[in-house]
Amino acid sequence: VAVEVVDVTGSTNADLLARAPRLDAPVLLIAEHQTAGRGRAGRSWLSEPGHSLTFSLAWRFADGLRGMAGLPLAVGVALAETLGRLGQSVQLKWPNDVLKDGDKLAGILVETQVLPDGAAWAVVGIGVNLVMPDALEDRIGRGAAAMPWLARMDRDELMAALLDGLADALALFARAGFAPFAARWNVLHAWAGRPVVLLDRGEVRHEGLAAGVDDTGRLLLDTAAGRITIVAGDVSLRTT
Ligand code: ATP
């Protein structure tokens, strides 16, 4: 994987997506600062210089986009397991967040591009909060967690550990899809068995107990009417 570092850019995901048609090998692009970080559905990912890790990894999938909905979850597993190996315990919130003590520590955004030959590039963007100043948390407007312990770690060592975990996960995902990650995701599930509501554009669509994910990364929700499965479109989960 070629590693590139830039001082400042709008969005590392946007940069790699723009280059995807011309890439011939995986690239990790790290930004010291990102000024227009993206979340799902046009939301933003906020960060301040020196207070977070912001990077994206572009990975080619020869078979196109089949099964890709599970990729953000597989990336979450890789990230959480790497942090776990570093001694930092985190949990996963479906579909694409990493939580620490219930607050969002890291966000994952996967964006894709299909090439004329049917192959696809997935650009996996990750933001991890290292330090969370009150002013930034105020701008975010909801609970956000940070990991000062990581801020004190050697940055190259930390990035190397994260990249190792991600590259392994992406290679496995390309070979076998989400299935090998499902049990690992469920072990890390922040809200296992907890009452949750599923919001679709702010409206409550379903209520139930979060029962983990299936082999394709769909959320299993135990509702009054029985178990239902939810695909990771632009829906949001909240605890009640
Ligand atoms: P939801 O929780 O509604 O499902 P999401 O978790 O999918 O949303 P994303 O689109 O992945 O959210 O990320 C963008 C959201 O993350 C923002 O709308 C904001 O609430 C929150 N956010 C933005 N920057 C940060 C940050 N540095 N740390 C924690 N949370 C952040």
Image (cartoon, helix red, strand yellow):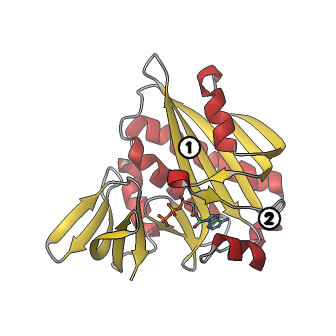
State yes or no: Cβ of the residue under disc 1 lies below 8 Å from any atom of ligand 1: no
Residue 147 image label: none
**Residue under the point 82% across and 56% down:** 155
Q: Tell me where residue 178 appears, x and y as whole percent.
A: 39, 47
Q: Please tell me whether mark 1 sits on a helix, a strand or a loop.
A: helix
Q: Tell me where residue 187 appears, x and y as whole percent.
A: 42, 68
Using the image, determine if residue 131 lies above or below residue 108.
Answer: below
Q: Please tell me whether mark 2 sits on a helix, a strand or a loop.
A: loop
**Residue under the point 34% across and 74% down:** 197
Q: How many marks?
A: 2
Q: Left or right: where does residue 38 sit relative to residue 182?
A: right
Amino acid type, residue under disc 1 in the picture = Asp
Q: Residues within 10 Å of mark 1 (few under 14, many from 20)?
A: few
Q: Left or right: where does residue 97 sit relative to residue 206?
A: right
Q: Looking at this view, name the residue that lies furthest to the top.
A: 117
Using the image, determine if residue 20 lies above or below residue 140.
Answer: above
Residue 168 image label: 1
Report the front residue among 74 and 144: 144
**Residue under the point 53% across and 41% down:** 111
Report the front residue among 224 and 192: 224
Q: Tell me where residue 133 appears, x and y as whole percent.
A: 78, 75
Amino acid type, residue under disc 2 in the picture = His
Residue 26 visible in the picture: no
Q: Left or right: where does residue 240 sit relative to residue 83?
A: left
Q: Which residue is mark 2?
A: 51
Q: Quadrant of the C terminus?
A: bottom left
Q: Looking at this view, name the residue that lies furthest to the left.
A: 225
Q: Quadrant of residue 53?
A: bottom right
Q: CA distance from mark 1 to mark 2?
A: 27 Å
